[in-house]
Image (cartoon, rainbow, N blue to C red):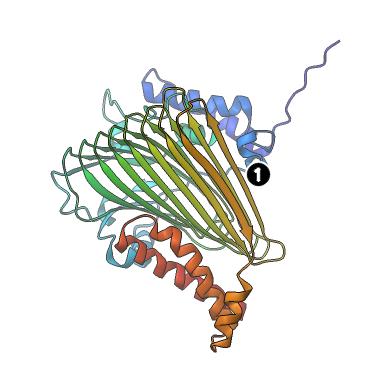
Amino acid sequence: MNAEMRRRLTAAEEDLASRVAALPEGSDRLGDQRRAAGASVVATGLPSRRVEAYKYTDLRAAFGALAPVAPPADTIAAAAAVAAAWDWDGLAARRIVFVNGRFEPGLSTLAGLDGAVEIASLAERARLPDADLPIGRLAAGNEDPVLALNTAFWQDGVVIRVAAGATVAEPIAILSLVVADAAVAVTTRHVVEVGAGATVRFLEHHAGPAGIAYQASGAIELDIADGARVTWARLQEEGPAALHLSTLVARLGAGSALDRLSVNFGAALSRDQGFVDFAGRDSRVGFEAATHLDGRRHSDATLVMNHAVPDCASKERFRAVVADEARSVVQGKICVAPQAQRTDGRMMTQAILTGDGAEAINKPELEIFADDVQCGHGATSGRLDETALFYMRTRGIPKAVAEALLLEAFLAEAIEGVGDEAIAEALTARLRARLAAIGGEAT
């Protein structure tokens, strides 16, 4: 006799099943898409260590319960939060603001983008009859459960279209804030389409209150047409008790380029994952990540590069400083299809451990089916250079200051890799302030 093994549902999974069942009925594509995505996660459960891609980040255990959907923030409180938010040293003058998962046009500053850039709220478009929203087009066939959860429950987002041939001088910032005094769930979805030959920079910023165990989920579908150039810098500094999940799905046309920088300072648990498809020849991607963790924070950076056409290049570099009992996870995979000859794919992960209980897990993978390629990966982890530290101390530099300078230099190299001097200087200054604040707390 065969006994059927039944999976015992957690409280969060039971709540998830109820929320999926409560999704509104209807025959429109968006409603069908929401219900199908939610049902897929209900069927498999929240990802746990048994799922290879989540072996080191057990979300089933992390979600003790699903937080209620965040209500709209009080106008005064929302305005105060936006005013207090860091402005990237003046670079974020053009801002698209989301508070508790909802687009706030009154708090956004979009002047000067007319003609070159079209911006519209996803939630507003979804209310239009026969709305044909571009959600899920790039993510078709992607069965990742975190992306599916976002697809099922997104509250709002933005559609951004950059006109073909446009050169957008100032960066476009997307600011996502949480304003709450209790645990809430915030879910946003953005679709960005960059026209052929366009050049544009984006600044993505996530922040929220300390001491509140809120849950933030964001997903971006980025479609880069032939010959376009995109620089994308993101700063994740959620509250230290928060859970943060972020997904990027990107497609590159022929002769296009994407430079992406991810700086991770916040959240108790964060996962920043990317899925990049090379759809046109002679395209290039550069991914840089700089992570600083203290306490018992857990950070997961997962990236899959799908080389499906010839003559493309990808370069990924992950750097992490891990203190106290924190944990850094980096999972990188370069996939090269049989027809993707002359692929150049490289990946490097490096970590400095400054705490006795600190941990760095690096899992690089190559999956190559072509024979004319240059692909490689490497990983290192260790302590601060004692020789360099000794040299600096003999020059009269206090130990805490010397350590901060060495850590800044290590992470700043990844930040500078984005190739935009103004963005790199702003984020390096932010890193310096963080290291100084943590050093002051330690003393």
408 over 154 or under it: above or below:
below
101 over 415 or under it: above or below:
above
Q: Residue at x 53, y 74 (%)?
A: 404
Residue at the left extreme, as displayed: 115
Q: Quadrant of the N terminus?
A: top right
Q: Is residue 159 left or right of 309 when viewed as pictured? A: left
Residue 80 can be seen in this image: no
Q: Quadrant of the C terminus?
A: bottom right
Residue at the top extreme, as displayed: 1
Residue 75 can be seen in this image: yes
Q: Which residue is mark 1?
A: 56
**Quadrant of residue 393 within the rendered picture:** bottom right
Q: Residue at x 42, y 50 (%)?
A: 100
Q: Give residue 257's position: percent from left, percent from top.
A: 31, 42
Pick the residue in front: 376 or 297: 376
Q: Give residue 303's position: percent from left, percent from top.
A: 50, 41
Q: Residue at x 46, y 33 (%)?
A: 373
Q: Give residue 19's position: percent from left, percent from top.
A: 54, 32
Q: Give residue 12's position: percent from left, percent from top.
A: 63, 39
The kind of residue on which mark 1 rests is Tyr
Say how many tags the image has.
1
